[in-house]
Amino acid sequence: MMVTERDIIDALEAVAPLNLQENYDNTGIQIADSSRPCTGVLLCVDLTEEILEEAQQKGCNLVITHHPLMFRPVKSLQQRNRVEQTLVSAIRRGIDIYSCHTSIDNAPAAGVSHTMARMLGLRDVTTLVPVNADGAGSGAVGNLPATMTYAEVVQLIKDTFCSPVARCAPAPDGSPVSRMALCGGAGADFIPDAIAAGAQLYLTSDCKHNHFLDYTDSIFLVDIGHFESEQCTKQIFYQIISEKFPNFAVYKSEKEKNPITYC
């Protein structure tokens, strides 16, 4: 059976429909001839020239990214920056691009935060900030499988998401942790929601200095890298496409690297 780009996109949007994206976002088609046969799909968090080369080597004419390449309007293609250069390269190579960003962040059950919660072994997981009765929305909150110390939870987080470091608030001495909330990506806006949900610990990325100052007496903040918190999207996309098209060529990028290193 011939699989078109539209078939792949429909499979993703059945799980993460476009109406779940935030109003600031640009989830969806970046470049596509959705009626053409799809020769293979390469999955990544961020699109770079190196990943386009990898897609071409693997015979893939469609790349699925988490972060949109065109997050802001592109008014011309003069190759003045990474976005313009990558767009021109993709067009020249005949590679189309689809981005599944906040739609998969906000998707119920299969979304980023719920996936992170499962990876940590949380129980009784619910959406932290639901937007409808189906459980779609931002973040997740649940109970740890066993009471742990703050240091033990931080180590679990680092091990689970392959994060060499974690920025943390000072841990309360001797207090146990049984309930935590989290949000993949930049989720500092939901710290008050985590507190209201009874979480003792909140995991997210891109917290600012003042977040640690303002909430240190209310909740224990753990901040890991943005990339580390969202690299699970590749597995989410892989599972969606592979379940729908079991014999189709779909690959997680082997060349993608975290753009941030820790010294």
Image (cartoon, grey):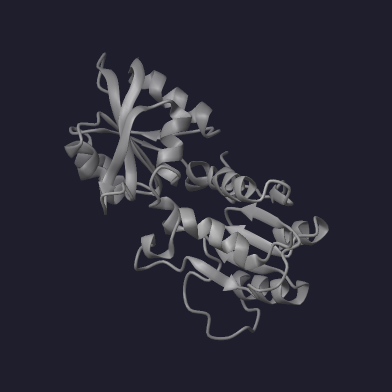
Question: Closer to the camera, 207 or 213?
Answer: 207
Is 245 left, or right, of 196 in this rendering? right
Where, quadrant-wise, is the N terminus in this rendering? bottom right
Q: Quadrant of residue 32?
A: bottom right
Q: Is residue 116 above or below residue 24?
A: above
Is 56 left, or right, of 139 in this rendering? right
Q: Could one spot residue 157 in this view of the protein?
A: no
Q: Is residue 151 above or below residue 185?
A: above
Q: Residue furthest front?
A: 1
Question: Closer to the camera, 92 or 246?
Answer: 246
Where, quadrant-wise, is the C terminus in this rendering? top right
Q: Residue at x 44, y 28 (%)?
A: 120
Q: Residue at x 44, y 34 (%)?
A: 166
Q: Could one spot residue 141 in this view of the protein?
A: yes
Q: Is residue 47 above or below residue 108?
A: below
- Residue 3 position, x and y percent, is 70, 62
Q: How many labels sit on residues?
A: 0
- Residue 260 position, x and y percent, is 56, 48
Q: Quadrant of residue 125?
A: top left
Is 201 left, or right, of 33 in this rendering? left
- Residue 93 position, x and y percent, is 77, 72
Q: Is residue 20 above or below residue 78?
A: above
- Residue 104 position, x and y percent, is 45, 53
Question: Closer to the camera, 146 or 169?
Answer: 146
Q: Residue at x 49, y 29 (%)?
A: 158
Q: Quadrant of residue 50?
A: bottom right
Question: Closer to the camera, 213 or 258?
Answer: 258
Is 233 left, or right, of 57 in this rendering? left
